[in-house]
Amino acid sequence: MRRHGRSDPEPYQSGTAGAVPPTADLRHNRARRRIRPRQQQAEPKPPWYARVLRLHNLQPSNVACFIFLEGSIALATLLAFAELVSWWAVIVVPLTVAAMVKLNDYAAGKLQQP
């Protein structure tokens, strides 16, 4: 039987010169991948920043979370390089921004209640 223009290898016999071991032709014996039915699309996970802060009322986008975290780190680093603030600001500014976001989430929850 010919596959893809090639003939099948001879059966393997140990000690025979030029014989092809059975593992040499694995590309034709690949196991088929299981096809799983698509499950209903679940709601996408909130961004990592929102999950860490356990935000319940605010739903910041990925871009907003990026700006909150990396933007505050970059701003604090620039201020520290300009020697306008101490190097502690690189740690304190992102924590302060996170606290303000959490406080905003808490206030939004209180305002929604009747």
Image: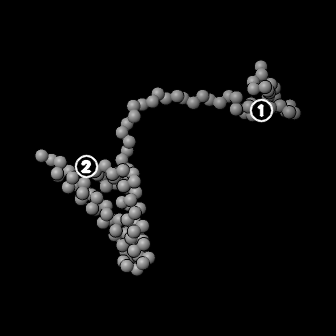
Give the colouring mode of the picture.
Answer: one colour
In front: 64, or 87? Answer: 64
Q: Which residue is mark 1?
A: 21
Residue at the top extreme of this rendering: 1
In depth, the one of 7 and 20 nearer the eye is: 7
Q: Position of residue 19 (x, y in %)?
A: 83, 31
Numbered circle sitting on residue 51: none
Residue at coordinates 20% horizontally, 55% vertically from top-left? 107
- In the current view of this chain or complex, which residue is farthest to the right? 17
> Can residue 11 be seen in this snapshot?
no
Q: Tell me if 74 is positioned left or right of 31 in this view.
A: left
Relative to 84, does residue 46 appear above or below in the rendering?
above
Left or right position of 37 against 21? left
41 vs 18, nearest the viewer: 41
Neighbours of disc 2 within 10 Å: few (<14), some (14-19), many (20+): some
Q: CA distance from mark 2 to mark 1?
A: 63 Å
Picture coordinates of residue 99, whole percent (x, y):
28, 62
Residue occupying the point 46% across, 27% down: 37
Marks counted in the figure total 2
Residue 73 vertical position relative to residue 112 in the rendered view, above or below = below
Q: Which residue is disc 2 drawn over?
A: 57
Asked if disc 2 and disc 1 are in contact, CB closer than 8 Å, the reply is no
Tell me where residue 85 sits by quadrant. Answer: bottom left
- Could you tell me residue 64's position as x and y percent? 36, 55
What amino acid is labelled 1 in the image? Pro
Neighbours of disc 1 within 10 Å: few (<14), some (14-19), many (20+):
few
Residue ID at (36%, 72%): 89
Q: Amino acid at mark 2?
A: Asn
Residue 16, percent from left and from top = 86, 31
Residue in the picture at 77% in, 22% down: 2
State the image quarter where residue 84 is shown: bottom left
Query: With 6 as the anchor, is 33 left or right in this view?
Result: left
